[in-house]
Amino acid sequence: MTDRTTVLFQYLIPKQAITLLAGRIARARAGVLTTHLIAWFVQRYRVNMPEAANADIASYGSFNDFFTRALKDGARPLARAELICPVDGAISQFGRIEGQQIFQAKGHHYSSTALVGGDARLAAQFDNGHFATLYLSPRDYHRIHMPCAGHLTRMIYVPGDLFSVNPATARGVPGLFARNERVVCVFEGAHGPFVLVLVGATIVGSMATAWHGAVNAPRPGRLSEWRYDDQSIELNQGQEMGRFLLGSTVVMLFPRGPLEFNPAWQPGGAVRLGEVMAQGA
């Protein structure tokens, strides 16, 4: 299937209905049917179960339990770096934010203001800063960890479309990551503010954070915001901050300043949780 056909298909299918159905199936505790579904998925996507904390697929009560499985202790050692990679996945794009414009794919940019739900003051903190967009495929580990230590200040749920976020769709749908449903998590770190955006997609049943639980179940259809000024929610580098119930993409924003991304990183390349993402120059 060509990129053009893939994108056209994305516009035509009933994405919301498919996602709701997928969510119900993923939550279902259907005994042997659930086990058969997990077994098919493991074989279809070559999931590495030996690295899971629980490798027994028959022990998972639901597909969601399997999909958000934990890893064995020590499976992802953390590098000594200012910023570590927060997920297993593939590099979509990374680099400098040009003013407020974030590079999506050849011929496509989107604004940081649109990404964070229209908050121009928040977005302005990342003018000419740095970004990284990481795609989680179905076979990947689907918990998201902190690239550096941070103090949580805000969380914003932004309703939106549910396009797939695979590479073909990223190449063909303008402003994809600022159009899809997303959860914007705002932190203060040692070098200033930073943002992790959890981007939803077709069949992503929900997105959850460590401090809130499921954010978009049920989908409220309106922008919602939570402020944590009166709370002390501190997360360490490498600590779990959220998870996808079925896979998607994480977009990170960092402020202007000296930052050098891992020279081994290339768009399309595979990355693993805990490896070096960037160092201060």
Image: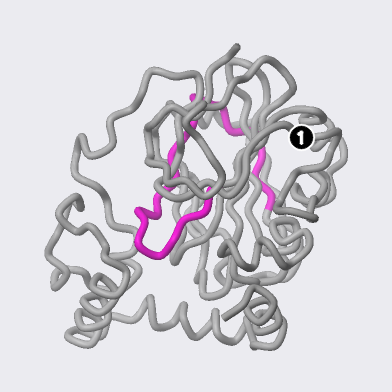
Magenta range is: 134-156
Where does residue 49 sit, x and y in percent of width and height?
A: 19, 59
219 horizontally vs 81: left or right: right
Image mark count:
1
Which residue is rendered at x = 29% and y = 75% of the image?
44
Where does residue 206 sit, x and y in percent of width and height?
A: 51, 66
Q: Callout 1, which amino acid? A: Ile
- The correct choice, above or below, for 122 with respect to 53 in the image is above
Q: Residue furthest top?
A: 281
- Colour scheme used in the picture? one colour
Question: 219 or 99, which is in the foreground?
Answer: 99
The residue that disc 1 covers is: 97
* Residue 136 drawn in magenta: yes
277 horizontally vs 43: left or right: right
User: Based on the displayed image, in which of its 4 quarters is residue 58 positioned?
Assistant: bottom left
48 horizontally vs 93: left or right: left
260 horizontally vs 160: left or right: left
Q: If the image is split into quadrants, where does the C terminus sit?
A: top right
Counting other residues with Cα less than 10 Å from the Cα at mark 1, is it few (<14), some (14-19), or many (20 or more)? Answer: many
Which residue is rendered at x = 43% and y = 27% of the image?
276
Q: If the image is split into quadrants, where does the N terminus sit?
A: bottom right
Which residue is rendered at x = 68% and y = 70% of the image?
220
Where does residue 247 sit, x and y in percent of width and height?
A: 47, 62
- Determine the secondary structure under disc 1: loop
Where does residue 145 sit, x and y in percent of width and height?
A: 43, 39
Q: Which residue lies furthest to the front in this view?
A: 2
Question: 178 or 222, which is in the foreground?
Answer: 178
Which residue is rendered at x = 67% and y = 20% of the image?
192
